[in-house]
Amino acid sequence: MNTEVRIDKWLWAARIYKTRTLAADACKMGRVTIKGERIKASRLIKAGDEISVLKPPVTYTFRVKQTIENRVGAKMIPEILENITQPEQYELLEMTRISGFIDRARGTGRPTKKDRRKMDEFTSYAFFDEEGDGEIF
């Protein structure tokens, strides 16, 4: 166990990001902060540090329990970090999930049954004559 480790390595090893590159990119974009300050991927952290990670729309907050450089199994994560994220953040996440279904922009995703019928009706008129006897043009 090291006393200090790079933040990008720790974020990857603690399974907060899927790859170390994603962790480093998050640091570059200012999505990872310690005490409200943006940090570089090379910043060394130690046990006891509180890290805030913005994964829109939620800001997760973690307390470092143990510094590690190698990725560990998911069952060992409670030994590595303590999740101290505010409950309001999880409520915000749930509201975003719910509103995603309500505020779906018209025309995105699969067509509804009504839309499909309108398309079928339109294409049938476009390819057949006005009498509808099946003769094309």
Image (cartoon, grey):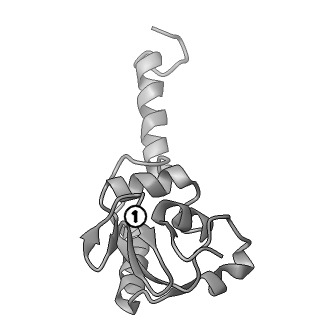
Which residue: 47% across, 65% down? 7
Total number of numbered discs in the rendering: 1
**Extreme residue in the left direction:** 37
Instruction: Quickly name the residue at label 1.
Output: 43
Crowding at dot 1, Cα within 10 Å, few <14 / some 14-19 / many 20+, comes out as few
Q: What percent of the width, then of the height, locates residue 18?
A: 58, 58
126 to the left or right of 64:
left
Vertical order, 135 against 117 (above or below): above
Q: Where does the N terminus fall, quadrant-wise?
A: bottom right
Residue type of the residue flagged with mark 1: Arg
Given the current orientation, which residue lies at the most extreme top position? 137
Q: Would you place residue 78 above or below residue 18 in this image?
A: below
Give the image quarter of residue 45: bottom left
Q: Is residue 132 left or right of residue 36?
A: right
Residue 5: image x %, image y %? 52, 68
Q: Secondary structure at mark 1?
A: loop
